[in-house]
């Protein structure tokens, strides 16, 4: 009897093990990160929905293979960091499978052969790479086009200027700060179709294969599903339909609406998107400032404490936070901390971009508010503290009842000014992929290349909001005084 039971267990154990392994590794829903502005691979159409070759492809593969996807579009650099920090399972963003990237990512089968091509203004006399000698060529950071330019720089003698997004690069070409741009061929052709007055005097050069990627050693089943789905789409002709939809010479899918050539048209087509971005900006600024007030007051009071240890703690906090640029602080919180935790525990602990932005802004503002509080308290005549203490009133009660009420009146204008600065600083936090008002504008520009009009609209938005808040704060200040 025991032998029969043992035999059954030996037979069932491998089966149960396989079943458990599948349950642990198999997922039915994946988070996919992508760029926010890399047309025609990914961009927002006139209805503010993300579309493009990559978007259609990953959706079609997910449907073919029977899994769900959640797509985020934080931008190329942020998407790469999202995959590395475990905030996303994979990235599809017109990404070339370079040797350097293969050290960090595992790539799928190629779905597009990328050609890099030079774009210049229609009036330019540049007709060969030799003509670039002494001139400046713009390129997006981290792309295969940048690798090509770097490898050939000594040969042709040009200068390289890198950009984080295509819209800024093409704007620089239009304003004359650079002489040429190098980008993927379909991207430049798309920009020409959107009204950019460019030409391509030199034939494109193959630079590599475009592929889907996951973090090295992670999600092998997702790569397998992608490859199987891609093979099926190629076999049934659906893949070619996706390419033709965006790359065919007679394609009209990617063209902007005529209304977006005017300020009114831009507002009419994008007001919902802009209001959403504005809501995130105001929420981010208000929440972070309330937290910063609380933290800043604590460290500000510490800075004038009779206890040396508290003064030292406050000094270290202020010096460290003020000494780190806000963009680096936000990047460290959003990407650095999750990577550090994973290296210690082996568990991925992603942080939400809004939460990371709020923490970064709160700490940054708190350091400056602490100095405002210290200055306000120091501005109250020291004799009042001495007189109160000589009457036997405790230090804490003296601060609450005598010093702080007077100091608050002195600090209030500076608090208003710091809130305005915090509101403006939300544009810096967009570097981690948070789609607030400024990032929203950049995404819109990437679709229609109406940078002057769009930035003017954004400037008016910020001007109106900051003016209204400043007026409100000044009225509050008068009432308090």
Image (tube, helix red, strand yellow):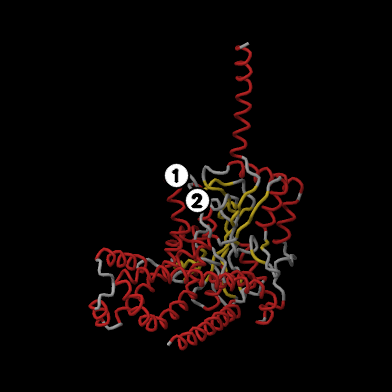
Quadrant, the N terminus: top right
Residue that carries the numbered disc 2 in the rendered image: 349
Residue drawn at x 49%, y 67% as measured from the top left: 429
Q: Is residue 312 among what the camera can see?
A: yes
Q: Secondary structure at mark 2?
A: loop
Please state the horizontal and vertical placement of residue 411, each as a whole percent of the image. Answer: 38, 81
**Vertically, is 104 above or below 117?**
above
Residue drawn at x 43%, y 46% as measured from the top left: 343
Q: Secondary structure at mark 1?
A: helix
Residue drawn at x 45%, y 62% as measured from the top left: 153
**Residue 278, located in which quarter of the rendered image?**
bottom right
Question: How many numbered badges does the structure rendering display?
Answer: 2
Whether label 2 touches label 1, CB < 8 Å: yes
Please state the horizontal and vertical placement of residue 363, each as a whole percent of the image. Answer: 42, 66
Please state the horizontal and vertical placement of residue 237, each as a whole percent of the image. Answer: 76, 50
Q: CA distance from mark 2 to mark 1?
A: 10 Å
Residue drawn at x 27%, y 82% as measured from the top left: 384
Q: Is residue 158 among what the camera can see?
A: no
Per the rendering, the mark at residue 345 is 1
């Amino acid at each position: 009897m025991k032998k029969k039971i043992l035999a059954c267990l030996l037979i069932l154990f491998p089966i149960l093990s396989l079943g458990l392994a599948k349950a642990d590794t198999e997922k039915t829903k994946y988070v996919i990160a992508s760029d926010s502005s890399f047309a025609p691979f990914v961009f927002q159409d006139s209805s503010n929905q993300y579309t493009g070759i990559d978007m259609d492809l990953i959706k079609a593969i997910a449907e073919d293979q029977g899994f769900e996807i959640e797509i985020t579009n934080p931008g190329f650099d942020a998407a790469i960091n999202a995959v590395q920090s475990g905030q996303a399972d994979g990235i599809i963003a017109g990404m070339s499978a370079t040797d350097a990237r293969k050290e960090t990512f595992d790539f799928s089968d190629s779905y597009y052969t990328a050609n890099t091509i030079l774009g210049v203004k229609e009036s330019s006399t540049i007709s060969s790479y030799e003509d670039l000698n002494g001139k400046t060529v713009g390129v997006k950071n981290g792309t295969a086009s940048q690798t090509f330019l770097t490898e050939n720089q000594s040969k042709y003698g040009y200068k390289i200027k890198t950009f984080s997004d295509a819209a800024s690069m093409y704007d620089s070409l239009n304003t004359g700060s650079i002489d040429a741009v190098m980008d993927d061929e379909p991207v430049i052709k798309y920009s020409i179709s959107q009204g950019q007055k460019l030409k391509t005097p030199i034939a494109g050069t193959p630079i590599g294969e475009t592929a889907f990627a996951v973090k090295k050693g992670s999600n092998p089943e997702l790569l397998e599903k992608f490859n199987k789905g891609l093979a099926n789409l190629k076999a049934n002709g659906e893949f070619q339909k996706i390419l033709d939809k965006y790359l065919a010479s007679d394609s009209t899918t990617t063209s902007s609406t005529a209304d977006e050539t005017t300020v009114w048209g831009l507002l009419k087509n994008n007001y919902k998107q802009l209001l959403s971005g504005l809501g995130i900006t105001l929420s981010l600024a208000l929440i972070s400032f309330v937290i910063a007030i609380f933290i800043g007051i604590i460290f500000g009071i510490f800075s004038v404490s009779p206890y040396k240890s508290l003064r030292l703690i406050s000094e270290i906090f202020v010096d460290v936070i003020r000494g780190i640029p806000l963009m680096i602080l936000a990047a460290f919180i959003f990407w650095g901390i999750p990577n550090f935790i994973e290296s210690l525990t082996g568990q991925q602990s992603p942080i939400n971009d809004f939460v990371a932005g709020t923490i970064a802004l709160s700490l940054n503002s708190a350091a400056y508010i602490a100095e405002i509080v210290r200055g306000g308290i120091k501005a109250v005549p020291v004799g009042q503290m001495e007189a109160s203490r000589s009457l036997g009133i405790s230090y804490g009660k003296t601060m609450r009842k005598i010093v702080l009420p007077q100091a608050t009146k002195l600090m209030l204008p500076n608090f208003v000014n710091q809130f305005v600065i915090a509101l403006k600083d939300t544009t810096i936090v967009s570097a981690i992929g948070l789609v607030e008002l400024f990032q929203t504008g950049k995404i819109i520009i990437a679709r229609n290349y109406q940078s002057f009009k769009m930035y003017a609209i954004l400037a008016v938005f910020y001007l109106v909001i900051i003016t209204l808040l400043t007026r409100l704060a000044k009225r509050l200040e008068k009432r308090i005084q």
